[in-house]
Image: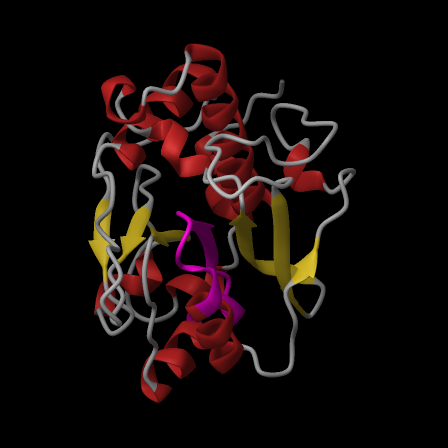
Amino acid sequence: MQKYSFLILLLVVPAVLFAQGHAPRSEFVVARLKYNGGGDWYNDPSIIPNLLKFMATHTNIDVGNREAIVEITDEELFSYPVIFMTGHGRVSFSKPEAARLRLYLTSGGFLYADDDYGMDKSFRKEIKKVFPDAALVELPFPHEIFHSHFSFASGAPKIHEHDGGPPKSFGIFHEGRMVVFYTFNTNISDGWADENVHGNPPAVRQKAFEMGTNIMVFALTR
C-alpha cells in the first residue's frame, strides 16, 4: 500500500483539464455523471460518500465527504478530474454530448463506468460515439490500475454475483493514456453502498473499497 499527497496529485493531472475557466478544487471530489437514456444514473446514493470516507482513512489524499452530480453539458464538468457512472438501464449520448465528453477525456479527464448488470449493451454503443476510433480493450492482470495502491493479482474482484462468469475490466486509450475504465460482471460500486443495502459481507466490501481506491489513485497519477 502506498501513500500520496493530494497536492502532488493535482500537479500531475493535466493542466489542460482546467483550461476551460475552472480552477481545480482544493479537495478531491468524484462527480457522478447524470446521463440521459432512462437508466438509473442515481443508483445507490451512498456509494461515493462511502468510498471517499474509505479513501480518507487509507490514503493521504484530501477528499471531500460527498459526491457531486454533473451533466456532460455543465460548465463544471472540466473542474472534476474523475467522473463516475453506473446504472441498470439504458445510456444515451447525443452527438454534442459525445463530442464534449471526448473533449473532457482527451483534455485530462477520466471516466470510470461500472455496469450494474443492465448497462453494458447501451454503454458500449454510446461510448463508441465518443471514441469511434478506439476499442474497449480488456486489461491484463499486471496492469497498473490493479496495483496502484492495493494489489489485486487476479484483476478486479467479483463483488456482486448476478450473471455468473468472471469479472472483466476494459480500458479505452487515447495517445497511450487510459481515459475510460469500464468494469463488467463485477459491480464494484455495489460494495461501496451502505452495509444494509446489498448485504455484502465485510470482506467483500473491503475488496470493493480497495479496488475503488486503486481506480481513483490511478486516475490521479497516470
Q: Is residue 59 left or right of residue 178?
A: left
Name the spot of residue 69 as percent of width and height, x first. 21, 53
Number of numbered discs visible in the structure rendering: 0
Q: Nearer the viewer, residue 219 or 146?
A: 146
Position of the N terminus, as image quadrant, is top right
Query: Was residue 109 drawn as part of the magenta stretch in this picture?
Result: yes
The location of residue 28, given as percent across then percent down, is: 35, 39
Front in this rendered view, residue 9 or 222: 222
> Is 140 rendered above or below residue 107?
above
Q: Is residue 10 left or right of residue 80?
A: right
Please name the residue shown 48% across and 56% down the image: 110
- Whether 95 is drawn above or below 181: the answer is below
Can you give x and y, in whole percent of width and height, for residue 216 in the image?
49, 39
Considering every residue shown, the one lying at the far front of the view is 163
Residue 144 x/y as whole percent: 71, 40
Taking the view exactly as shown, the residue that stands out farthest to the top is: 202
Is 158 included in the stretch rendered in magenta?
no
Q: Against 200, is 174 above or below? A: below
Residue 28, can we see it?
yes
Colouring rule applied to residues? secondary structure
Magenta segment boundaries in residue numbering: 104-121
- Is 149 on the left-hand or right-hand side of 108? right
- Residue 62 seen: no
- Residue drawn at x 68%, y 31% as measured from the top left: 147
Location of residue 179 by image quarter: bottom right
Residue most extreme to the bottom: 95
Left/right placement of residue 100 relative to residue 69 reads right
Residue beneath the point at 24% across and 62% down: 76
